[in-house]
Image (cartoon, grey):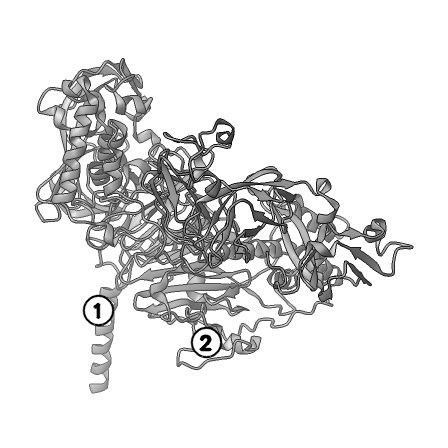
Amino acid sequence: MPSLLHFTVCFLTVFYCTYKASGELESCQLQCGRHLQNCSCHASCLNLQNCCTDYQKLCPRISPHSGTLMGGKEFTVLDVTYDKTVNVTCRFNNETNTQGYVDESGHVHCISPLVFQTGHIPFTLLLNGLSSPPTSGTWLAVHHSKASENEKSVLVDSKKWQYYGTPGYNGTLTMTWNPKTLQTQHVRIELWGYNETGTPYTESWEAYWTYLYTLELTHPNNGNFTFTPVPAQSPFDQWEVGMLRISASDKKEGERNVHAIWSPVHALAWHLSEKFREDPVSWASNKCIDWRQMEKNKLPNFLTETPDCPCTLAQSRADTGRYHTDYGCNIEKGSVCTYHPGAVHCVRSIQASPMYAAGQQCCYDESGTQVLTTDSIGGSTPDRGHDWGSPPYRKPPRIPGFSHWLYDVISFYYCCLWSDNCNYYLELRPSSDCRTYKPPKVASAFGEPHIITFDGLNYTYKGKGEYYLVKSTNPSLSIQCRTTPFQGVEKMMSEEEEPSQTSQVDALMSDENQPPPTFHNARARRRRSLTDRTNVASITSVAMQEEDSDVVEVRLKNGTDQELEILLNGEILSFDEQSWMDMKGVFIYSSITSNATVMFPSGAGVEVRVKKGFLGISVLLPEIFHSKTEGLFGVMNNDREDDFTMRNGTRLPSSATPEEIFHFGADWAVTENNSLFQYDSQELIDSYKIKHDPDFVPIFVVDENKNQSLTEAAKTLCEDDIFCRFDVLTTNSLEIGNATKISYGSHKALVDNLQPVVTCGWLAPPANGTKNGTNYLVGSLITFSCNTGFVLTGSITRTCQADGYWSGEPTMCIPASPISCSSQCGLVLAQCSCHSTCEKLGNCCADYRYFCVHISPDSGLLMGGREFVILNVTFNRNSSVKCRFNSAIVVDGSVDKEGHAHCVSPLLYETGRIPFTMSLDGGITYPHSGIWLAVHPGKVSETEKCTLVNETKWQYYGTPNFGGSLTVLWDPHMLETDLVDIEVWGYTETGEPYSSSWSPSWQYLYTLVNNHLNDGNFTFNPKPADEEHRVFEIGSLRIVPSDYKDGMW
């Protein structure tokens, strides 16, 4: 009996435990989004069919799921119905209630509330005042400017609204809206104002929206309202930033959180006091001065912690982890840059600064150069309040959009738009240049997959499983990828019907951005069994998390080859209503279904794209990750030799074999405990129980002789792209190879756009003068001039050099002498003249001939190289002579034993009178000036040129009947030297024809002979030039003294 009793007790215990774990006693009450012991309250339970029995009742979906943070948008609770008599209250953030109702079908409707944050807002339903059991969900609050147009009214001629009362702006104002948004016959139109009170940067600092007054108590809901504004009465006229609200006329005036349509936030010029209308400039000037005093005396300096801007437009658009397009100035939407005239595109820093939650803005002109406020009113401006707000939001200056309006936008109206005090605004909102900007490093994976590490090592890894692309502990960042075996395409045509591979290549190469050609659409996809074991894999999902942020997964949408699916903590996100989402510790942007960008607070950015069912991933990491990464993307430290580092520190050489690389990749498989992926189907659960499949052995070497026609087609399509060719031959698909080619091209373009550039920093114009040029990157040239009555000292031109410093000396404009021609040749002064007519008029200044020099010879070939002497005046033989032509080209001169100064004419690209100035102090000052005449090559004297004996032979050399030796002659008296070098120079023109980029160039190619006797004759037998010089088809010979360096100007 003891054994029987023992058996019975065990049976009863197991039965009781099974009953407890069956899920019947488990509930989703307060558990939505979680996996319970034996059932689930997570959205994935619908696919896995393991939902708790009350899941849909307590964790319902809603539609629409997002709207402006201003509230007033109605949404429906799906999946659950109630009796129509139930009284519904919708509670958001466990603090704000709005009134709901039950419709005829039993569905609950809620109104979103006004909140001071963006992102997911939790809500619960209180039925008849009770919250048990609590039905809950999340509402997505978005930046007001990013909300759908149907949610907002339109201010017709918005500039008129915001300039109303200033000269030229009066009359009626009109706004329109979509009347279908509000299901009511009559509406009320109200004005609401925004303000922040309390001590800045303390707990007492609060934000609030206040109902001010009603413009129209009852108006037909016809989508149009026109009125003539009148000045508001005190104290309402003190409100300068606000919105109009349209709501049903049966609601109470100023009642919060009712179904409504809001206007855009704007400057309330149209309602300001009578004093503003009487003298808007004076009113705005006083406001500007008050704002300036507050900024300087009461608010901390936030500029020290805002990041420097990218140096170029290309960098700003490529650095997607740290900068994003400013919706107010977008090159892809016509560059309507209201607040930044002269700019074509602006970006904003994604993350706010750490202490003051400030933002950075960077604007660029059509040449891609950063626009600075020191040069233009349209320059980039930092923001005390980041336009997009900053977590945790809710308090100033972190309120999305509105803090920015209060501290950065309305002050711009005060100082720049309503008055002429913009210098005050730009003093306190100066542009950041890019001297400390460092571009991120990029690593990418695409195709089968092919991987390019942060340090530029490229390889192919074809394992099946889930792996770390990037793993970092400080900052903590995990980016994981899932690879899936490629299943291929089974042909559905006969060989006669199949388009030729040549025609497929032609179609693909004709326009890589066009939709797939017809031959792809004419076949259906089928899974095939890969009987030849040509095992290859592709990335189908990537999951990521930084610190304790929400987990984001971007994966190939099931059943498609061109769409992505984005999951947040395992739940699918819909981007149908919004393209930008603010989540916990992460931002997500997806404007089209085939692309997604994920951005983290560290500045890390992840771009995911899909082409032909293959995911392409690019990870951008800022400098703080230097030497802190590991995984398939390697160690980011500019050293390729340690990119194949295993978990235990063992390193494979960069020349590792494919088999060795396969084992390296397997070492970086994730584990079940640290996987970030969502397994919301039985297929995923079964396929990835093992995180690296050891039985999946990929092909390591491709047999290019197996299918000769495909190989030839791959060569034509892919050219020198080894990744493209590999993918064509392993998948038998030119389209997939072309997708790989495009992805690789995208990676190379990204790397090119993020190359560091040298900047020398902003260069100020001299006092009492001006400058020409606003580009401060390497190679850029800035020229200076002085106002009337002042003369220039220092460098008239300065060039940004490769070492990050400006050439030349600081430029100054000093008062000109009324009786001296120093730096004033050509002018008529108050007491005498420095103009060439003075010699006939007899009114020359005493030093006219000393400073306004004559030269001999006074003309020569525009190719330069002709020496001239300064007449009628002598100088100290120890003088350091420099001659500067066209204010830009500087050549060294000399003083002979008689004291006459000599210079050599430079290479020019123009004919005519070329002004030059001369310095005796090594280029510090250029007080002497004159004119050089540059002449067309066909019009100069023969003694200036060498002669090509039998010129026809020179130009036909190498064609039939033209060979042997060539001879060149010259006048040896033109060069005072015993030995000469004879050089070959080539001419070319580069850039886009008939555009500002089209430029000419003479280049030294090579020297035919060194140290040849200056006897006026040289004969030689030509040999073909080196390959690098054969591109030049037009050129000239140059004969110079042998003591010059080869190619010296």
Would residue 579 appear left or right of 526 to someone viewing this image?
A: left
Q: Nearer the viewer, mark 1 or mark 2?
A: 2
Position of residue 180 measured from the top left corner of the image (x, y, whole percent): 32, 23
Of 959 and 670, nearer the camera is 959
Residue 190 visible from this viewpoint: yes
Q: CA separation, marks 1 and 2? A: 57 Å
Outermost residue toward the right in this view? 961
Image-quadrant location for residue 212 = top left
Position of residue 89 measured from the top left corner of the image (x, y, whole percent): 16, 37
Viewport quadrant of the N terminus: bottom left
Question: Circle 2 — which element?
Answer: helix
Residue at point 83% right, 58% down?
A: 966
Residue 127 visible from this viewpoint: no
Q: Earlier in the sequence, mark 1 or mark 2?
A: 1
Tag shown at residue 686: none
Of 867 and 1047, nearer the camera is 867
Q: Which residue is mark 1?
A: 16
Position of residue 852 measured from the top left corner of the image (x, y, whole percent): 49, 40
User: The disc labelled 2 sits on which kind of residue?
Assistant: Asp
Question: Circle 1 — which element?
Answer: helix
User: The disc labelled 1 sits on which kind of residue?
Assistant: Tyr
Q: Is residue 424 above or below residue 536?
A: above
Tag shown at residue 642: 2
Q: Residues within 10 Å of mark 1 (few under 14, many from 20)?
A: few
Q: Is residue 362 above or below residue 532?
A: above
Viewport quadrant of the C terminus: bottom right
Would residue 1032 appear left or right of 607 to someone viewing this image?
A: right
Would residue 625 appear left or right of 733 to someone viewing this image?
A: left
Q: Is residue 394 above or below residue 28?
A: above
